[in-house]
Amino acid sequence: MRAAGYEPDPWQIEFLESDAPQRVLLCGRQAGKSAVDAALALTRSITIPHHLTIVAAQREKAAVELIEGKFQPLYAQLDERSLPARRVSSPDVHRTVRFSNGSRIEAVTTSAMGVRSFSAPGLVIIDEAAFVPDALYYAVRPMLATSRDGVLLLSSSASEPTGFFFETCRAIDEDGGEGGGWRKWTVPSSSCPRISEEFLAEERRRMPQWQFEREYECKFSPAIAQAGMVYPWFSDVSHVGDPPETFVRVVGAVDWGFRKPGA
């Protein structure tokens, strides 16, 4: 990052210097996770011959955008003459960036079937992992079975307290990652020097609490104010009164709550 003219934040330095084979970035919005994803992918691609980086996201377009919007601008700031390998193609057609040392960065299709043709990548990045289907994650993991020094990176902001990303974060918090080679970085937006307190204060005022917690505070918050409430604005003062003595008509409904248990 410094070679490209960017001074990394302390947590980014720690992340890039880590040797953990399985890593989680739980970051608030605009805290710098995509920049450090790009730095890791470019560093490994440039310095390790025939290195394969896989980028997966909720949608294929999002994976390509990570390459075009973060990886390529970072590379453009580097002095190619000083690099051990140079970029030789861009992902205009085939979703692939190739380097002169045989390395490549691939944006994969987002179906579980679409990732099964790849094997032994050196780095797998699942971007916005909290929004990626579980099936894709479990289809990606076996790629690393024969990888030497392969790295799996789950990178995301928070969302619902469900799914593989949430469960992975919870498991790491409970056991510290011992035995599984996991390392987790939690970076709320308030820790980013490029985001002002005034901006966050205005966002907090404008957003529902659960939404602000997800976007900026790295909290897996359900979209309800309290357990069992359907609407965050529900108030037992404003919306609850004495029932009438008789009912003209009674209507009942059920929401089974598979995705929104609070309903």
Image (tube, rainbow, N blue to C red):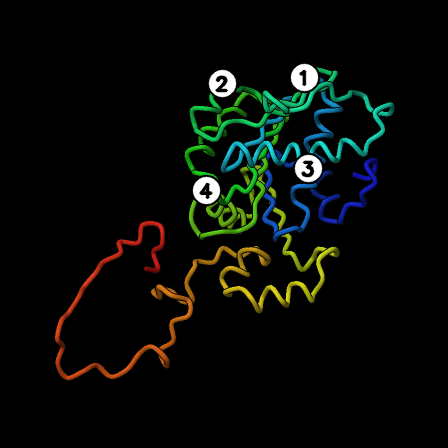
- Identify the secondary structure beneath mark 3: helix
The residue identified by callout 1 is 50
Q: Amino acid at mark 3?
A: Lys
Q: Amino acid at mark 2?
A: Ser
* In the rendered image, the vertical position of residue 39 relative to residue 104, given as above or below: below
User: What residue lies at 64% left-to-right and 67% top-to-bottom?
Assistant: 201
Counting from the top left corner in percent of width and height, residue 5 is at 83, 40
Indicate which disc, 3 or 2, sits on the residue closer to the N terminus: 3
Compute the Cα span from label 3 to label 2: 25 Å
- Identify the secondary structure beneath mark 4: helix
Tell me how many marks there are. Answer: 4
The residue identified by callout 3 is 70
Q: Is residue 183 left or right of residue 170?
A: right
Compute the Cα span from label 4 to label 1: 30 Å
Q: Nearer the viewer, mark 3 or mark 1?
A: 3
Q: Residues within 10 Å of mark 3 (few under 14, many from 20)?
A: some
Q: Nearer the viewer, residue 165 or 105?
A: 105
Compute the Cα span from label 1 to label 2: 17 Å
The residue identified by callout 2 is 117
